[in-house]
Amino acid sequence: MKIIEARNYEDMSKKAASFIIEKVNGSSAPVLGLATGGTPLGTYRFLREDHLNNQTSYQHVYTVNLDEYVGLSPDDDNSYTFYMKKELFGHIDIPASHTHLPDGMAADLQGECRRYESLIERLGGVDLQLLGLGMNGHIGFNEPGTPFSSETHVVELTDSTRKANARYFDSLSSVPAQALTMGIATIMRSKQILLLVSGKKKAGILAKLLSEQPNEDIPASVLNMHQDVVIIADSDALSIVKERSMAF
Ligand code: F6R
């Protein structure tokens, strides 16, 4: 596991964008696993700016997102499909047919999970998976207790995750109760993982993930078993780790 310290959120985002751009420029058909939420917003902004200023092309890039809410249509502005168009896909030259998210409107959700797994396999697997870190250690929507062997599945969102995400919705009651998410085994099959962590409020969970043996109560602790994980975290997020001088 490699840890890169960033000065602040902007610096973390810039470093993450450079990391992704290097992968995009360095491979003939890279498959990027993408995340939503607050953490990667700055990274996507830098990718948009770079596309505009340096014409980095995404015509050869394929993407698969981690997750999607159940029951939100792609044009619902709280769906992750909408988020990805708004924050990234709508501003770069990636063909729409190369971008993939689980279909939260599928009539057969179990079938959709199987389709998503086969799709990732057909693409040759994820080359670089971008991850954010949930306050309870979740990755994707894999909540504490999710088996490490899980593949793409339907998840009942915990109250804490629904509350954390309620900031984007009109009210807590409009936050969907379910989502589709890549499983932990799906994420672990990615060739490389880039975890972004920012802010004091994530310092405790980041310290936990770095100090504990992999266990299903802290889903992100599984990353200790992956051979190629890069964490870009800002000083605030690393504050407890540094206090205990765990990683430095
Ligand atoms: C998003 C996702 C989630 C978030 C996590 C952190 O696709 O799967 O695991 O990465 O909830 O969210 P933020 O970045 O909003 O703190």
Image: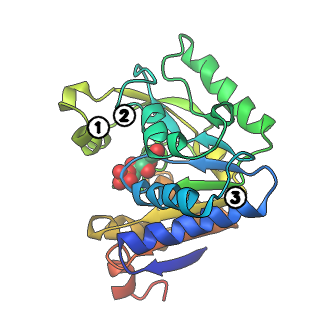
Q: Nearer the viewer, residue 150 or 130?
A: 130
Return the residue at label 3: 24
Q: Which mark is residue 162?
A: 1
Whether residue 139 can be seen here: yes
Residue at image location 48% in from the left, 62% down from the top? 46
Disc 3 element: helix
The residue pinned by badge 2 equals 157
Amino acid type at circle 2 is Leu
Alpha carbon separation for disc pair 2 and 3 = 33 Å
Please say if the residues under marks 2 and 1 sit with CB atoms less than 8 Å apart: yes
For the image, the number of numbered tags is: 3
At 63% from the left and 63% from the top, the residue drawn is: 21
Mark 1 closeness class: few <14, some 14–19, many ≥20 residues within 10 Å: some
Label annotation for residue 133: none
- Residue 43 spot, x, y in % from top left: 47, 60
The vertical placement of 193 against 92, above or below, is below
Image x and y of residue 114, in percent = 67, 25
Between disc 2 and disc 1, whose residue precedes? 2
Residue 3, image x, y percentages: 54, 77
**Which residue does the image show at 44% across and 45% down from the upper left?**
87
Q: Would the CB of label 3 be found within 8 Å of ligand 1?
A: no
Name which residue type carries label 3.
Val
Assess whether mark 3 and mark 2 are in contact (beta carbons under 8 angstroms): no
* Alpha carbons under labels 2 and 1: distance apart: 6 Å
Which tag is nearer the camera, tag 2 or tag 3?
Answer: 3
Residue 207 in view: no
The correct choice, above or below, for 59 with respect to 132 in the image is: above
Question: Element under label 1?
Answer: helix
Respond yes or no on whether mark 2 lies under 8 Å from ligand 1: no
